[in-house]
Image (cartoon, coloured by chain):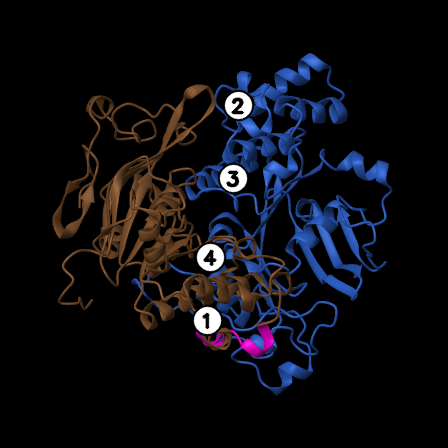
Amino acid sequence: MIAKAHITPLLAVENLQTLVPIPGGLVHAVDGVSFALEPGKTLGVVGESGCGKTMMARSVMGLLPRNAIMPPETRIEFLGENLVGLAGPQMRQILGKDIAMIFQDPMLSLNPVIKVGKQISEVLTHHLQMDRQAARDRAVELLEQVGIPMAERRFSHYPHQLSGGLRQRVAIAIALACEPQLLIADEPTTALDVTVQTDILDLLAMLQQDKQMAMILISHDLGVVAGRTHDTAVMYAGKIVEQAATTELFEHTAMPYTRALMDAMPRLTDPSHTTLQAIGGHPPDLIDPPSGCRFAPRCTLAKARCRQQEPALRNIAGKNHQFACWYPLETK
Amino acid sequence: MSLDQTQTHPLLDVKSLVVEFAIDSGLKIQAVSDVSFTIDNGETLGLVGESGCGKSTLARAIVQLQKPTAGKIWFDGAQLAGGNDAHLRRIRPRLQMIFQDAAASLNPARRVGRTISEPLRASGQTHRHKRRDIVCALMQDVGLDPDQIYDRRPFELSVGQCQRISIARALATNPQLLVCDEPVSSLDVSVQAQILNLLEHIKARHKLTMLFISHDLAVVKHICDRVAVMYLGKLCEIADSEDLYQSPRHPYTAALLESVPEIPAAGVQRKITLRGVEMPSPVAPPSGCRFRTRCPRAKKRCTDIEPVLVDMARGRQVACHYPLDA
């Protein structure tokens, strides 16, 4: 059926598990994450530091520590092909070309001793076999496209000569050079000022629409995700604990953890000196996670069952809204 | 705010402060350029602006970590800048600061109990057991268990715990003014909420006056009574926080407020869309109004004449030739 073929996901992740051995034991960094992403759509991923957001993204990219383990039941299907266990050379054909990534700190993701223009044209000569002049011209064009003034001159600048905002634009230009079908943006604006953040997010949204690119936007800032994504997944302790269309998730929050994150956030609309609802305690140890619901030790609504039995993700009837909680918040 | 009868002056009074740095080839940049403001006893003043606008330099100049090039700072009626060392040593315990990266601001090799007791020793508390008692009380004050924490080193603690330690260290000398430079910027929202609540709690308990620097406007609104907005070394607007957030008068303040991502995404109608990609270089700031190169409302007068802070209703000051309507 044609209609069905149309919504074939670009990326289908099934039961993603990433285990990292460390001296103290085996860290379950990502523990059974599944989601699908259609072309042109944006998935937001939120959660506290250490919840596995970045490790999940890196697992998709195959950018894991050498000793990391992904069990055989993990499937990461990109255009129908399983990326798990793909050999280095095959993976390198895809990375930077079909799937690209931008990172939080562009100072660390750019090479400090290579001119920024060269770092863009390198991608073009490598993946698209462009000749040097064509690659150079295209690189200047890309610099213009990501809103860098005096692109011709900036081509021969080194990363340290640019401000944080411009560096992140360069990183975006590199990521978009081959017009990837999937862009993974890991906290792309966390290191930037709010005004620059708005510009960068607007830029990503515009480029995404132009190219019908799918995007995974990872952020610890719920505000960033709320305005910029179609779907949102909330992660806690290596698992997705709630997932829905973004407006649905924020309007009809079911999982107490999502609600707690929202309540902890200071809002412009609150009067000054409002006491914030902090979340007590710490995220659990991922070497030996607690039995039952992993959020139970910090959850104000937890009951005995929560500490004994782990809730699985389940659907709200009639909606594409999943959550993992025995006693969900009342949904309107 | 209850003021002492004896106190008629603000706790901190900064007048025409300039901080210059020499860069290559004899050029100078003014990181802080002719800034004046006051903070009353018991008040929290917020200072917001983009990176590189001079917020941190201003804070460092106030606690005398950075020598001002010109201008004066009075603290509780006594002049800070230009005073002699002995005088400064007497005043310093009353001025304390906490920093953004708490873990980096603690000595990694030192047990945290010792870190907190160091300022006590430096300010003349010679009795070792007494120091230990005070440190334990301070730890409890900031929500840490002394039995668990006293002999730990920073790497064994979480970032939130490290920030609590640095707050306890700042409180050790019984300060009047606490300068907080982006104290929650590297924290998760859950921990950020804890630290913000803690700051409000210790402010009340220790009768503190605070200067709170942050690039996060929502955080600043939560904790501050008044807010000053800084751009490229100058103040553009200063007002009561409710007033400032309700109706910003300076276009830059409005642009900052409109950039804050909120839930639900309100689909904010932007009144102010900034021009240009970013802040101009402070080496050669624009003539006239420094914000004019990015301001959508700029006219010829903004190029020619530099606007100064003008008094408006309810104690607000705005430096703009064409302020937004109230």
Whether residue B190 appears in this view of the structure is: no
Sequence-wise, the earlier of marks 3 and 2 is: 2
| Figure quadrant of the C terminus of chain A | bottom left
Element at label 2: helix
Answer with left or right where residue B108 lies relative to residue A23. left
Residue B142 has which mark?
Answer: 1
Q: Are marks 3 and 2 in contact (CB under 8 Å)?
A: no
- As drawn, A161 above or below B207: above
**What is the drawing colour of chain B?**
brown
| Three-letter code, disc 2 | Glu
Please report, as a chain letter, where disc 1 is located: B
Real-space Cα separation, disc 3 to disc 4, in angstroms: 29 Å
Residue A144 has which mark?
Answer: 2
Q: Residues within 10 Å of mark 4 (few under 14, many from 20)?
A: many
Q: Nearer the viewer, mark 3 or mark 2?
A: 2
Whether residue B297 appears in this view of the structure is: yes
Answer with left or right where residue B124 lies relative to residue A148. left
The residue identified by callout 3 is A205
**What is the drawing colour of chain A?**
blue
**Front position in the image: A282 or A171:** A282
